[in-house]
Image: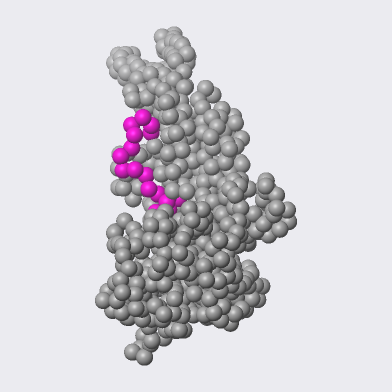
Amino acid sequence: MQFLHPSFLWALLALAIPIILHLFHFRRYKKVYFTNVKFLKELKDERNANRKLRNLLVLLMRLLAIAALVFAFAQPYLANKKKNFDKKLVSIFVDNSYSMQGLSRDIPLIDKAKQRAEQIIQAYSETDRFQLLSHDFNGISSKILTKEDAIENIEEINITPSVKNLDVILQRQIQTFKGAQESKSFYFLSDFQKNITNFPNIMDTSYTLRLIPFQTVQENNISIDSCHLLSPTPLLNQTNQLIIRLHNYGAEDQDNVRLNLTQNGQKKPAGTISIKAGQSILDTIQLSFLKPGNHDLVLEIDDYPIQFDDQYYMNIYIEENAKVLHLSDRGSNKYLSALFSSVNELNLASVNSNKVDYNAFGSYSLIILDDLSNLSSGLISELTNFVNKGGNVLVFPSKNGTKDQYNNLFRSLNANTIKQWTETDREVLAVNTDEFIFNKVFNRISNNLILPKTTGNYEFSEFSSTSGEKLLNYRDGSTYLYKYLRGEGQLYVCTAPLDKTINELVVNAEIFVPMLYKMSLAQAQKNRLSYTIGEDVSIKVKNNTDQNEVLFKVQGKEEFIPQQQNIGNFSQINMVNMIENAGFYDIKADGILSKRIAYNFNRKESDLTNYSKSELKEKYGDSVSIIAAESEANISQIIKEREQGIFLWKWCLIFALLFFAIEGLILRFWKG
């Protein structure tokens, strides 16, 4: 046993006071007249013996009571042999996610967590150093603070939409104190939602992990979890299907939940849904876009009391007059010209391959190679870059073309290469209607559907490392039309030339028209409908100005200059946790709109199910130390005992009161 304040032990000298009082106990005697002195002497001897024993017991109780009080002020403790009393490093994580807005005894959990965090800091000495963390990962989280600074910064912690898994928080704590020789203690003050609590099952023994769980009344909640378009590319003046996913995280079934959709500021009902407890459902909303450009969509439900996940913001961009480049040695193709002249959304430019302007490639969505005899190394290089940066290329190889040059293009894009030309009559039989190009083109594939026939075609190698998706197949199983996803774009390869004398594709309108239309609009990398607040992602935007160095600004519910990296005609924009509110944001350069995006709150907080103290203990066992947040006692004392050992001063006070009580009973009931 050791003492926190051993100097108080000098007060044990006070034990001499009751001893002196008992040794020099002068008592005033009272005269009693009694006739027979003999009986008086016998009574006096008996009462003196009783009084002497009683006085000794009273003296003992007083000595023990005074000694217990002195020990209480000296604060004895049983030292924890595993701990040392050198300078300590303490990291405290305060959960400031939306779920911590819940109430416990009419006090928000976030406020109670901040109170407990201050008590933890108070338990340590002035020489100890601290790290203060929240979900924000702001600048203060990477600093080592003094005791005073740590207490001051607790009040700066506020509710945030950013949510991180707790293993990410733990790794930040470990990284901050990496290499330090001092004892390290990591505290987590949280409601420990199950979808973010994922500590490793085996903890490093170089630190102590302490969990302080907070509990609140479980609320019912319905969330709009996600939305996506069924088609990867939304089409103008056509029906587009929006798939939505809703989840009931509560313990009760929810009926007739109202859905509303706001499109470009116009609100309209989208129906009602019913969701069983703990289940999710998918629903479909029909959308139509009557003009190109940006379309803002907000899907809403009526749900209380948790509302941050009741809205889902989306932005859909419809291309205006997509441009298609036709490269051919024979000039324009009358079939292509006729097709594109009838489609207002598409513009066709036919150029001789010898006169092509490579700098203009970035303005086209699709480049068609039609019967080129030669492909220069420069053209191959530019086409490869075009595909990797998001463009689409459709290749109709020439019967008399240079096979090696075509194969150089295919190798540069990791596609199957040409083996040989075969003069064989073939007929297309199978259409891949699961892929975007032919998806929802036909109500059903009937026997009356006329498919292309060819009198000759190229045979291609088939390797797993270069395999592509097969869109159209011949009756014998060989491939007529390939699709390859490469970089951010797509490569389409037809095994037969576009020449009508060899390939009947141009006269098969049921295949030719939708194929070229959707290839012109297809996007390998889908334009994201929305982004998630707190998500670490780069957004690619075009530079719409003539300046070499472009400075982008983000305008919306917040306005700021984001991190950016300019790469040619594009820039990578990183928001680095600067967005805190869901809604629509414009990325602009010199006042010119480059991209409009939508941001939503993270749905991790939608599931309010959390671990109780007993569940945490069962899940992580002795790897963690758990402290009850509901305890009315000052948590500082609990921390001190766990850091330094078991304090015994309370027992000393109890024994002091007990000894005083025994003394009082002796004096009251023992008549000597």
Highlighted range, magenta: 191-208
**In the image, 225: left or right of 625?**
right
Q: Which picture quadrant has residue 456?
A: bottom left
Give the camera-side residue of 180 and 472: 472
Res 439 visible: no
Give the camera-side residue of 215 and 476: 476
User: Residue 660's x, y, as percent?
Assistant: 42, 26
Give the camera-side residue of 205 and 463: 463
User: Residue 332's x, y, as percent?
Assistant: 56, 74
Q: Residue furthest left?
A: 476
Residue 202 is a magenta residue? yes
Give the residue at x 36% y 38%: 625
Give the residue at x 59% y 61%: 355
Q: Main secondary structure of the magenta part?
A: loop
User: Residue 356's x, y, as percent?
Assistant: 58, 61
Task: Please count the marks in the image.
Answer: 0
Give the residue at x 49% y 80%: 513
Q: Is residue 393 above or below residue 209?
A: below
Residue 134 is a magenta residue? no
- In the picture, which quadrant includes the N terminus? top left
Give the camera-side residue of 647 and 421: 421
Q: Residue furthest bottom?
A: 448
Give the residue at x 61% y 35%: 152
Coloring scheme used: one colour
